[in-house]
Amino acid sequence: MDLDNFEDSSSLIISAIRSISAARYRLTQGMEDSTKPLSGDYCDDFLSMMFSTEDSAEMPAAVSKALDLIFLLHADHEQNCSTSTCRMIASGGANPFASVSGASSALWGPLHGGANMAVIKMLNEIHQSGDDGSGFIKSAKEGKTRLMGFGHRVYRNYDPRATILKSACDQALEALGLESPILDIARNLETSALQDEYFIQRKLYPNVDFYSGIILQAMGFPTNTFTVLFGIGRAPGWLAHWKEIASSGSRIHRPRQIYQGENARPYTDLAER
C-alpha cells in the first residue's frame, strides 16, 4: 500500500493542495502567480501565495496564527464523513492520493464541509435585514429559521474549539484594523444563546464553524474557498488515518447492515395479474 513512500507522498499532498488552491484563486481573480520568496512558514507562505502583490504589506502575525489555528483545529475529528471515506478507500489498498481524493469528494457535501459558509450566509442575511440578531433569535425559537453554527453531534456543551477561535478572531480583526458588523451580530447571537433558557436546555452552543467563517472572511477569503481551506486543514488527519489502515494490515472494510424493511408479504401471482 505504498507505505515505503508515505513520507514523500504525504509531504507532496500537504504542500500541493495549498499551492493548487492559491493558484486557482489567483486565476479566477485575473492575478499573476505570486513571485514573493517563501519563508518556509506554511501559513505565512499560503497567505502570500493567495493575496500578495508587488506593493502589498505583510500579513500581521495574528492573522497567520489564526489561520494556523483553523488548520490545526480541523486536522482531525473522529469518524466524520470524509475521514470514514478515506479509511474505507484505504482499506481496499488504494494509495494516499486516491484515498485523500475520495475524502475531498465527501467533504464537498454541504452538510459536511459547508457549515462555516452557512454561518456567513446567515450573518450576512441578518445584517442586510437591519437586524442586530435579536429578531433572528426570536425567529429561531419559533422554528421559523435555523441558527447555523450552534450545536454539535459530539460536543453536547460548548465546543472547546470555538473558545480558542473566538480569541483568535478578536486578535486577527484587531491586527487587521477591521470593524465588522458581522462580528457584532455574531457576538449578539452568542450572548443571547448562552443566556437564553431555550438554547441552554437544548445545549445549543457555538461550535468551531461559528467563528472560523468570520476569521476567513476577514482575511479576504471568498466564501466559496471555505471548504477548500477545510480540506487543507483536514489533509494531515486523512493521511494519518490512511497510514493507520495501511500499517494495520486489516482486511477491506465492509460495514454490515441491518435490514429494516418488510418481511414476507402477500402478492398476486404473475399469471393472475
Image (spheres, rainbow, N blue to C red):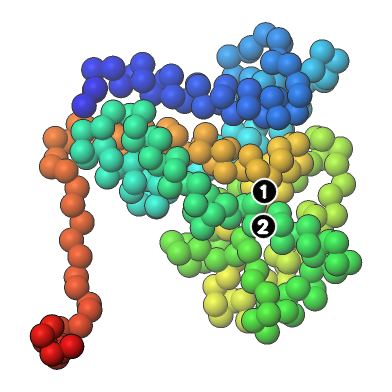
Name the residue rendered at 50%, 46% in the picture.
Answer: 108
Which sits in the foreground, 260 or 265?
A: 265
Contact, CB < 8 Å: mark 1 with mark 2?
yes
Is residue 52 depicted above or below 254 in this figure?
above
Residue 260 position within the rendered picture, expressed as x and y whole percent measured from the top left: 22, 77
| Tag 1: amino acid | Gly
Dot 2 falls on a residue whose secondary structure is helix
User: For residue 169, what is the image quadrant?
Assistant: top right
Viewer can see residue 168: no
The residues tagged by marks 1 and 2 sit, at their Cα atoms, a distance apart of 7 Å
Q: Which residue is drawn at 30% across and 21% down?
A: 6
**Left or right for 132, reference 149:** right
Q: Is residue 108 visible?
A: yes
Query: Dividing the image into 4 quarters, which one contains the C terminus?
Result: bottom left
Q: Could you say where residue 257 lies in the image, as x and y percent from the top left?
A: 20, 65
Category of crowding for the residue at label 2, using alpha-carbon neighbours closer than 10 angstroms: few (below 14), some (14–19), many (at least 20): many
**Residue found at x 26% / y 37%:** 90
- Look at the picture and state if 114 lies above or below 122: above
Q: Is residue 162 left or right of residue 267?
A: right
Give the secondary structure at mark 1.
helix
Amino acid type at circle 2 is: Val
Q: Position of residue 256 (x, y in %)?
A: 18, 61
Which quadrant: the N terminus?
top left
The residue carrying mark 2 is 119
Q: Name the residue under label 1.
A: 213
For marks 1 and 2 on the same chain, the one whose residue lies earlier in the sequence: 2
Mark 1 crowdedness (10 Å alpha carbons): few <14, some 14-19, many ≥20: many
* Quadrant of res 57: top right
139, above or below 243, in the image: below
